[in-house]
Image (cartoon, coloured by chain):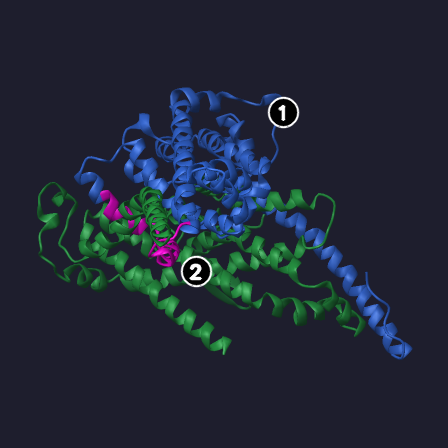
Chain colours: A green, B blue
Amino acid sequence: MRTATHRLLERERRLAFWMLLPAFAVVAALVAFPVVWNFWLSLKPVLLADLRGRSLFEFNLTLANFRQVLSDPGFGSVLLTTLVYTVGGSALSILLGLAAALLVREEFPGRAFVRGLLISPYIAPVVAVTFTWSFILDPQLGVVNWLALEQGLIRAPIPFLTGHWIEVAGWGETWRLPLALLAVIFFEGWRYFPFAFLFILARLQGIPEEIYHAAAVDGASPVQRFIHITLPQLATVLATLFLFRFIWTINKFDDIFLLTRGQAGTEVITLRIYDYAFGEFNIGAGSAAAVILFGILSAFLTVYFCWILREAE
Amino acid sequence: MLEKPKRGVSSVKSSHFRRRERIEKGVLRIVRITGTLGFLVLVLFPFYWMMVSSFKPLEEIMFHPANLGLDLHRIDFSAYREVLFEHGFAEYILNSAYVSLATVVLCLGLAIAGAYAATRLQFRGRSFMSYGILVIYMFPAIVLVVPLYVIFAKFGLRDSLHVLVLVYLAQTLPVALYMLRSYFRNLPLELEYAGLTDGCTRWGVIWRIVLPLSAPALATVALYAFMMAWNEFLFAFMFLDTPEKFTLSRGVVQLSESVHLSKQLVMAASVLVTLPILLLFLLFERHLVRGLTAGAVKG
């Protein structure tokens, strides 16, 4: 009896191995291995031209790539841009998602359809929506600039995606705003708010009606009910959303690459990685910048989870 | 519905509350209606504009850039004809379809086997695997692109649609495994035991019992994999060189670089790449939304 069970277990183990192997092999070869290989490349003087020779596998490790990346005079501003873009884009997409969720929270005819429409920016291919927005915001042919010109709102077209700075007068002062960076942050909000929207909507529907009734009986107005009931109930989901959006936004490459190619003050660290590797043909420096990105992300996650743990206590 | 204030609250106070309640409710209703409409305009305008511009002749776009409408008598399909047959998009559609469908089929096959093994079979390292899946999910595509480019260039694997399918497969598998595993875990074990004692093999159990029960989860995974592969830009951009092998996304970028002023062509191409995925989404909205809220779609 024992040996029979044993044999069965052995057979199960072998079957499990063969069932998992293909998936495991693909992910190991095309995700896990490149990540590890990236660390190796970051410690080597590799140019794109070196790919033919054997030097890729030689044991000639150095920190020169990191020194080069960190001493690059533009690197500080790349980090600052990355931070502004990531925090701004995450916050905007969550705020828009919150607003949308509150708007369609109550039943009305066609609600499911409206919900479906609101998600479409998230579903559509990134190339299509970036090119459409570039067209809409174009200084020569863009509909936004022409409408504003016709209405007399502006005197000259605004180069939304190619202008680094814009001066705006307001409250008795002139403000210098990073135009293209704000435009890509706006795009980020437009494209990714559905993610926050879906999560917040699901959470809102989980809040028991009785709490609201009780509050209404006690004389709390709709606005007070929102501030004292809804917001606290959403705190956890908002914090989780910020974590996800932060990770995905700091890792984001496609959107800025397609909108501005990192010009006009929108060069974030992922575009810097691309520029090193495929613009300057310096694979080593590109990998080093990727390791730095990974380091920043790990630091953020550490701080985030420490904070979560302290809050939980 | 709002309940009446409790008795005992003085009538002055309660009428004050009621008035405030009424005013705020009225204001909120207006805010809600205008806000929803505003949101819809902001969200849908780019899609509308993409569509409308693709039907306009070039002169219209050049000389009336602020014309928001579309002259129904002057709808022009020439942009589509040009894009499809002169810029190779007919071929790109087939390439994209091949890449996406192959990714879906392989992803389902490998994820079903892997997720079943990870749920029901006993082996060492089971829990380790499920954590590993999610850690891997964190790495950005741009970090993977550099080393993959190096390896593919070294071994002559670039510029191949089949290799691209494998890359997409690796991107979709972790989440597919995760989703299917959490679904399989909640299926009743008794049915499977019954199947096994009736002489089914493990594969028979999967085919006859597990898969029919998990149809919704399979649909979600399939949609998610399709969407990821169809929409993907960076890997296609870095790994494909020959225009005959371009996917739609890669083709749109190529087109936008070659025709600077002919926006109607780029918009027609954008419609071609957007329409299938949006239609699919509207048809299977519920499945896709489930995938989204499972944290599936990295975006």
Q: Are marks 2 and 1 on the same chain?
A: no
Identify the residue at image location x=24%, y=62%. Answer: A73
Q: Position of residue A293 (x, y in %)?
A: 31, 60
Q: Is residue B55 above or below residue A270?
A: above
* Residue A168 appears anywhere in the view: no
* Residue count near mark 1 (Cα–Cα under 10 Å), binned few <14, some 14–19, many ≥20: few
Q: Quadrant of residue B69?
A: top right
Q: Secondary structure at mark 2?
A: helix
Circle 1: residue type: Leu
Identify the residue at image location x=48%, y=27%. Answer: B58
Q: Is residue A265 above or below residue A14?
A: below
Q: Is residue B203 left or right of residue B286?
A: left
**Magenta extent:** B121-149
Q: Position of residue B126 (x, y in %)?
A: 37, 55
Identify the residue at image location x=88%, y=72%. Answer: B15
Q: Which residue is mark 1?
A: B72
* Residue B177 appears anywhere in the view: yes
Q: Quadrant of residue B225?
A: top left
The residue closer to the viewer here, B262 or B17, is B17
Q: Secondary structure at mark 1?
A: helix
Q: Is residue A265 above or below residue B173?
A: below
Q: Is residue B69 left or right of residue A240?
A: right
Q: Mark 2–mark 1 contact, CB under 8 Å?
A: no
- The prevailing secondary structure element of the residues shown in magenta is helix
The residue closer to the viewer here, B117 or A209, is B117
Disc assigned to residue A143: none
Q: Which residue is mark 2?
A: A246
* Residue count near mark 2 (Cα–Cα under 10 Å), binned few <14, some 14–19, many ≥20: many
Identify the residue at image location x=14%, y=61%. Answer: A64
- Inter-mark Cα distance, 2 to 1: 44 Å
Q: Is residue B117 left or right of residue B53?
A: left
Tell me the chain of label 2. Answer: A
